[in-house]
Image (cartoon, rainbow, N blue to C red):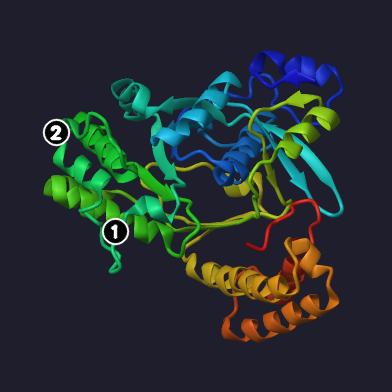
Amino acid sequence: ALPLCAANLAAIGAAGSAASLPAQGSREATAHIAHIGVGGFHRSHLAYVTDVLLTKQHAGEVKAAERWGIIGVGLMPWDKKMAEVLTKQDGLYSLLLRGNAAASARVIGSILEFVFVPADPEAALARLCSASVRIVSLTVTEKGYYRCTDGSLDRTAPLVKQDIDEWGGARGLAQPRTAFGLICTILQRRRSAGLGPLTVLSCDNMPMNGSVCRAVTLDFASAVDPDLAAWMERDVAFPNSMVDRITPATENEHRELLRSEYGIVDEWPVIAEPFLQWVIEDSFSAGRPSWELAMPNDVMLTADVEPYELMKLRLLNSSHSALSYAAMLCDHVFVDDALADPDVFAFLRAYMLEVVKTLGSVHGVDLAEYQRSLLERFSNAYIKDKLA
C-alpha cells in the first residue's frame, strides 16, 4: 500500500488499485470555491460533486467555460489536523461509498489548496480575497452561527465580540475568528479593490441555511460597517441548500479497508452511503459550477428549496428519531440492526405512511419511492450509523 499524495497516484494506479483516480491534468481550475470548515460532510458532497465535474470536463463530457476547484479553509484551532493531513496528501483524500449491493472508492482531487488561517492570517486573507474566488461555502455546524433564540446574531459571544471590536475599517479583520468575520473581511477587501461580490453558500444541515447565514452575516456587517451591510444586502447572494447523504465519522477500520482492498494509505478518508440528493437554490452572484450537468440524478438547481427540506425533515430526520426511540428500548445500538428487527421495521414503515400525508407534492420526487429508499438506506449494514 502507498501513501496518498499526488506523486504516488500513477504508482497506485499501476499497482492495480480498484479505486478511481484523478486523471493527469484534471486538477486545474480557473475559478475557486473557498470552503470554511472542511470535514467529512463537505467532502462527501460538495467536494465530491465538484471532482466529478472536473473529471468530466477534463474528459470532454461536460462543456463549461470555467473549471472550478476548492480552497479548503481552516479557521478554528481544531482545523489544524485536517490542514496537516490534506497538505501532506496534496489535497487528496479517498471517498468510500458502501451500500448493501456494492462498494467503491474514489480519490477526490477537487481540493487544490488548503489555508489554515491562524497560522498566517494575512497570507490566508490575501489568497481568499483573490479575484478567482467566486464562492465562499461553509459547513461550520449550527453552533458556528452564534444565533440568539430570535435568530439574530449573539453579539455577546466572546469570539463574535472580539471580531466586532477588532474590525479595522477598509481592511476588515487582521485575524478573523468567526466564519462571518472572515466572510465580511473578504467582502470588504473585494469591495475596496473593485472586485465585486461573491456568493456565500451554506451547506450546513439546518432548515433554510442560506437565509440563516444571510441574517447573521448581515447582522455582523451592520455592527462594523453599515455601508458594507447595505452593499451585501443588495449584491451578495446567500442561496439555500439541502444535502441528504449519511456520512458517519471516519474510523480506523475505514483506513484499514482502504489499505487492504485498494492499496491506499489515507490518513483521513471519508465513508458515505451511495445515495446523494443535493438541492441548491439557483441564486449566485458571480457564477457557479455546472454541478447538475456532472450528476443530473443527484444534484438539482431550483428556485425553491423548502419543499425538499420539509420532505427530508419529516421523512428522513423525524423517521430517524422515531426509529431511535423505539429501537433503543429494544436494546439495539445501530440503525441497520434495528431495521433487521421485524417489529421495528413495521413500526417505521407505518410511521412514514402517516407522516407523508403532511407533505404536498415535491417536484421531481416520487414520495413512495423516497420512503422505500429510506428503508433501504437505514438497512445499510456497512455504514453502521449509531442510533444515538
Q: Earlier in the sequence, mark 2 or mark 1?
A: 2
**Dividing the picture into quarters, in which one does residue 44 lie?**
top right
Residue 101 appears left or right of 304: right
* Whether residue 305 can be seen here: yes
State whether residue 62 is above or below residue 305.
above
Q: Is residue 327 above or below residue 253?
A: below
Identify which residue is drawn at 80% across, 35% down: 257
Query: Residue 37 appears at what percent x and percent y?
Result: 46, 40
Check disc 1: other Cα within 10 Å, few if <14, some if 14-19, many if 20+. some
Above/below status of 109 relative to 36:
above
Mark 2–mark 1 distance (CA, rounded to whole Å): 22 Å
Image quadrant of residue 13? top right
> The residue tagged with tag 2: helix, strand or loop?
loop
**Decide: marks 2, 1 in contact (CB < 8 A)?**
no
Callout 1: helix, strand or loop? helix
| Residue indicated by mark 2 | 168
Residue at image point 30% right, 38% down = 177
Kind of residue at badge 2: Gly
- Using the image, tell me which numbered label, if any, was put on residue 372: none
Q: Is residue 33 visible?
A: no
Q: Residue at x 62, y 62 (%)?
A: 388
Relative depth, front residue between 319 and 133 = 319
Compared with 301, 332 (above or below) is: below
Q: How many marks?
A: 2
**Which quadrant, please, contains the N terminus?**
top right
Amino acid type indicated by mark 1: Ala
Q: Which residue is mark 1?
A: 215
- The image shows residue 291 at horizontal and vertical percentages of 58, 45
